[in-house]
Amino acid sequence: MSGHSKWSTIKHKKEANDAKKGKIFSKVSTQITYAARQGGGDPDMNPSLRMLIDKAKGVGFPINNIKKAIEKGTGEGDSVIIFTEASYEGFGPGGIAIIVDVLTDNKNRVVADLRNIFTDFGGNLGEEGSVSWNFETKGLITIKCGHMEKGEKYGDDDRFVAEDRDDVMIKIMDIEGILDIEEEGSDELSIFTEFKNMTKVRDSIAKMGYILKDASIIKIAKIEKKLEGEAYEKVIQAIDKLEDYNDVQNIWTDLVIK
C-alpha cells in the first residue's frame, strides 16, 4: 500500500529517538491516561488501554506508574488530567508539508510552542487545511500471528502460541472494513482500514484472540516530494526537533524518507 514504508520508517525512527531521549515513558503515560479517560480503566473492557499497557510493559514502564496513569484518567487518584487530541499543520524546510498530532492538557501552550519550533527550523505553522488536503487518513493495525495461553500452573506466566500466518490472514480477511493486509517481519501482519472502520476492525481481531501490537490512525501523502543532500538533512533535523517536544505523538510529512 502506497506510503506504508514511509510510515514505517518514521515510526521506527520516532521510537528510537524517544527511547534515546528518555521521552517514551512520558508519552506512554499520557496515552494510557487518555485511553482510560475515553474508555474506562478496565483493560479487559478497553482494548486501547490493554494494548497500551502491553506497550508500556514492553518498554519497561513500571507497573505502579501504569496504575497512576490510569487513575489520572479515571479520576481515582489525587489528580485528574484531561488530555485533548489535536492536529497542527505547516511547512518545513524546502516547503515540505508537515502534520503534527498532539495529545495535550493545554492547547494554547502547544500552539505557541509549535509556532516557535517551526520558526526555529525555518518553517511556519499554517492554517487548518493548508497541507492536510494532500493526506489520506487510514487505520493501521499490527498483530502477532498467534494467541496467549494461560500458564498450566498457578503463578506460571502466560505463553505465546504462534499460528501459521497464512491461516491467520485467511481468518481475518473477511472482516468488514479491511482494505489491505501486508506481511511484516516473520510473524506479524499489518492490516489497513478506512479511518472510520479502524476501531471496529481492531475489536473484531481482538475478539478472535490475536495479539494486538499497535492500532492507530496514519496519514499518507497522496503526492510525495524528494529532497537531496543538505535540504533533506534539514527536514530530518526539523522532525527531530518536533519529536523532542513532549506533547507530540505523531509526525506526518510528504517527504520521501530514504
Image (tube, rainbow, N blue to C red):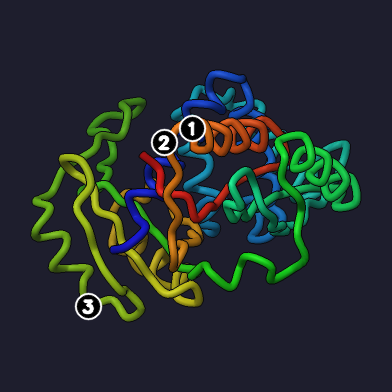
**Label 1 sits on residue:** 15
Q: Earlier in the sequence, mark 3 or mark 1?
A: 1
Which residue type does callout 1 highlight? Glu
Name the residue: 59% across, 31% down: 237
The 10 Å Cα crowd at callout 1, few under 14, some 14 to 19, many 20 or more, is few
Name the residue: 18% across, 43% down: 187
Which residue type does callout 3 highlight? Asp
Nearest the camera: 95 or 152? 95
Classify 16 as above or below 73.
above
Viewed as shown, does residue 71 lie left or right of 179?
right
The 10 Å Cα crowd at callout 3, few under 14, some 14 to 19, many 20 or more, is few
Check the picture and name the quadrant holding the C terminus. Answer: top left
| Residue contact at pointers 1 and 2, CB within 8 angstroms | yes
- Which percent across, then down, holds residue 29? 66, 36
What is the spatial separation of the Cα atoms under label 1 and label 2, in whole angstroms?
Answer: 5 Å
Which type of secondary structure does the marked residue at label 1 adopt? helix
Which type of secondary structure does the marked residue at label 2 adopt? helix
Classify 57 as above or below 116.
above
**Label 3 sits on residue:** 174
Select label 3 or label 1 by which is in front: 1
**Label 2 sits on residue:** 12
- Which percent across, then down, holds residue 249? 62, 45
Q: Earlier in the sequence, mark 2 or mark 3?
A: 2
Viewed as shown, does residue 257 lie left or right of 180?
right
Which residue type does callout 2 highlight? His
